Image (spheres, rainbow, N blue to C red):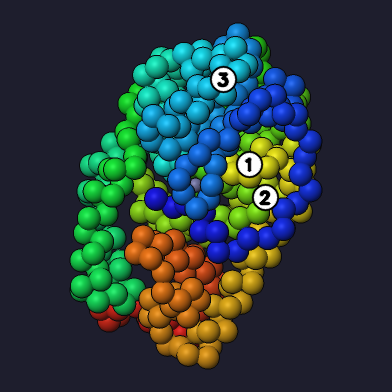
């Protein structure tokens, strides 16, 4: 789960040059192709990236299923390539539009598959983990102020996850500071950028001036700070939005000519886009402060209603992620107090 929520779209930053090589194949830098693949989600196509060389690298997979695979296969065929040629599959994060077909690509090609180390457990056994985490999710919804009836609607959460995702065995864990080599001797530096998901990595292609950002930095969508349960061994509970803001601060200092995002067109002004996303987050934090100041103390559910109105069932996860993220930032900086003594949490101004 955890598509970008699409609630705050902004004008696209200046698009970077790319050369059209085929119907769904664009060269963003020498030997690096962007291949947009349909997802069926509101976020639209997801970008996969192909690195040419005797030992090609593919970045991300598209959603689960044959359609993703055949669109990728057709785009590669135009360039004289096949999925069987992939030697290394790098995943930007564990979300379904980026990682759910990893097992198929691995099955077809026998490639090595790499993802941020903390997501190896999750992507190796999605079903069992979704099942195990459901009671915690239901308890969280109840604490947010949802009625028993509404909470019960989420008891099938793991079934929904199972329909759209697929475990991938034999993953290789990578993390901040690692270097991946391939595609004819290229060097790709790995940087951890948790926030949109806890598994977000960005890939810096040495000597090419290219940074692949996955969903960490997108050109027109403010990515959702998707809430996640903590992983065993986490020193502190994972807090999506505070992590995200730290990550954006680090990315804003990086240098590259072309940003290849997970969705949308490549662009150039990385620092500017990071600042815009931070400013949009600031605006939402300000809204939360104002609403709680006017109407508090209030439940997280009522705060979500005040911010977003009523949303379709599964979008509750995304809107609550936004609310939870804002609460984390504002509780940490001393602006809000969250009273957790009763059965339902109540948020008020400090
Ligand atoms: Zn994502």
> What residue sits 54% from the left and 78% below the top?
288
> What residue sits 34% from the left and 78% below the top?
345
Kindly check if marks 2 and 1 are in contact, taking CB atoms under 8 A apart as contact. Answer: yes
Kindly check if marks 2 and 3 are in contact, taking CB atoms under 8 A apart as contact. Answer: no
Within 10 Å of the Cα at label 2, are there few (<14), some (14-19), or many (20+) other Cα atoms? many
The answer to whether residue 189 is seen in the rendering is: no
Disc 2 target residue: 219
Q: Which of 242 and 137 is in front in this view?
A: 137
Within 10 Å of the Cα at label 1, are there few (<14), some (14-19), or many (20+) other Cα atoms? many
Numbered disc in front, either 2 or 3 = 3
> From the viewer's perspective, is residue 201 above or below residue 27?
below
Disc 3 target residue: 76
Residue 203 at x, y = what percent? 62, 33
- Mark found first going from the N terminus, 2 or 3: 3
Image-based side of 85 in relation to 118, left or right: right
Disc 1 target residue: 261
């Amino acid at each position: 789960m955890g598509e970008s929520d699409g609630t705050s779209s902004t004008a696209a930053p200046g698009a970077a040059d790319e050369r059209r090589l085929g119907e769904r194949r664009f060269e963003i830098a020498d030997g690096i192709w962007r291949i947009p693949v349909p997802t069926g989600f509101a976020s639209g196509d997801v970008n996969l990236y192909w690195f040419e060389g005797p030992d090609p690298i593919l970045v991300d997979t598209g959603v689960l299923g044959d359609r993703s695979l055949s669109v990728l296969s057709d785009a590669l065929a135009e360039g004289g390539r096949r999925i069987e040629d992939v030697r290394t599959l790098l995943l930007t994060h564990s979300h379904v539009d980026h990682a759910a077909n990893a097992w198929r690509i691995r099955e077809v090609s026998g490639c090595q598959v790499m993802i941020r180390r903390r997501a190896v457990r999750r992507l190796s056994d999605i079903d069992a983990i979704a099942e195990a985490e459901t009671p915690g999710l239901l308890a969280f919804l109840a604490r947010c102020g949802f009625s028993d009836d509404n909470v019960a609607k989420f008891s099938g959460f793991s079934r929904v996850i199972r329909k759209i995702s697929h475990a991938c065995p034999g993953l290789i864990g990578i993390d901040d500071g690692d270097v991946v080599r391939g595609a004819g001797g290229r060097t790709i530096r790995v940087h951890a950028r948790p926030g949109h998901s806890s598994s977000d990595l960005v890939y810096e292609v040495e000597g090419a001036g290219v940074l692949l950002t996955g969903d960490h930095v997108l050109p027109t969508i403010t990515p959702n700070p998707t809430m996640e349960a903590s992983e065993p061994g986490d020193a502190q509970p994972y807090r999506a939005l505070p992590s995200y803001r730290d990550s954006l601060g680090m990315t804003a200092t990086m240098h590259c000519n072309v940003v290849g995002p997970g969705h949308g067109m490549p662009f150039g002004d990385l620092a500017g886009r990071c600042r815009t996303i931070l400013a949009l987050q600031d605006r939402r934090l300000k809204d939360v402060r104002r609403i709680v100041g006017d109407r508090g103390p209030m439940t997280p559910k009522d705060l979500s209603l005040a911010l977003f109105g009523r949303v379709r069932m599964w979008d509750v996860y995304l809107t609550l992620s936004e609310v939870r993220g804002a609460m984390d930032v504002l509780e940490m900086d001393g602006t809000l107090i969250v009273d957790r003594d009763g059965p339902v949490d109540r948020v008020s101004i400090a």
